[in-house]
């Protein structure tokens, strides 16, 4: 599912951590905000996102992602978008339903043969009578 650019809002902030004087002057980190309810995603995907137990989703149904790994704002924007896309893709993923099957006759016979073989080995461990 592709994101619509109007669904995402950005805020440029100063990055935390080491970086010398550059970190105090340049707002290279970004906050990405994505309102799930107001987005153009399908309703089933919205429900799956809201049901996800993810700390990046606040109680108002807004995904907040902070990206500050790179020195440029553009790279941090791309990183935040990739993380948002990964979150949406994970919510959209549906496991294939399992089809119940019965064991084959051959597999049943092999299992029972193995059990009887193991039982005969254990029977030999008994006390020896003279």
Image (tube, rainbow, N blue to C red):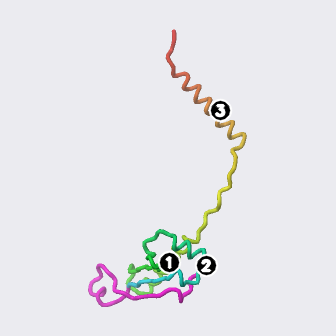
Q: Which residue is under mark 3? A: 113
Secondary element at image label 2: loop
* For marks 3 and 1 on the same chain, the one whose residue lies earlier in the sequence: 1
Residue, x 69% and y 44% (percent of image)? 103
- Few, some or many residues within 10 Å of mark 1 (<14, 14–19, 20+): many
Depicted 117 relative to depicted 79: above or below: above
Residue, x 69% and y 36% (percent of image)? 109
The label on residue 42 is: 2
Q: Give left or right: position of 109 versus 44.
A: right
- Range of magenta residues: 1-28
Q: Give left or right: position of 29 versus 53.
A: left
* For marks 1 and 2 on the same chain, the one whose residue lies earlier in the sequence: 2
- Few, some or many residues within 10 Å of mark 3 (<14, 14–19, 20+): few
Q: Which residue lies furthest to the right in this view?
A: 105
Number of marks present in the image shown: 3
- Few, some or many residues within 10 Å of mark 2 (<14, 14–19, 20+): few
Percent x, y of residue 5: 54, 88
Percent x, y of residue 98: 65, 57
Depicted 27 relative to depicted 117: above or below: below
The label on residue 117 is: none
Secondary element at image label 3: helix
Percent x, y of residue 96: 64, 62
Percent x, y of residue 8: 50, 86
Q: Which residue is under mark 1? A: 84
Q: How far apart are marks 3 and 1 (CA)?
A: 53 Å
> Do we see residue 6 in this rendering?
yes
Residue, x 58% and y 75% (percent of image)? 45
Closer to the camera in the image, 67 or 70: 67
Q: Residue furthest left?
A: 21
Q: Distance between the residues labelled 3 and 2?
A: 54 Å
Q: Quadrant of the N terminus?
A: bottom right
């Amino acid at each position: 599912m592709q994101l619509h650019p109007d669904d995402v809002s950005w805020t440029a902030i100063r990055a935390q951590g080491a970086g010398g004087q550059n970190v105090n002057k340049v707002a290279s980190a970004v906050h990405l905000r994505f309102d799930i309810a107001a987005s153009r995603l399908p309703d089933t995907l919205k429900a799956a996102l809201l049901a996800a137990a993810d700390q990046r989703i606040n109680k108002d149904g807004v995904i907040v992602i902070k990206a500050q790994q790179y020195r440029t704002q553009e790279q941090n924007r791309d990183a935040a978008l990739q993380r948002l896309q990964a979150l949406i893709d994970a919510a959209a993923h549906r496991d294939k339903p399992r089809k119940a099957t019965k064991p084959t006759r051959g597999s049943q016979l092999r299992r029972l043969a193995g059990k009887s073989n193991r039982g005969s080995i254990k029977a030999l461990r008994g006390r020896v009578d003279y």
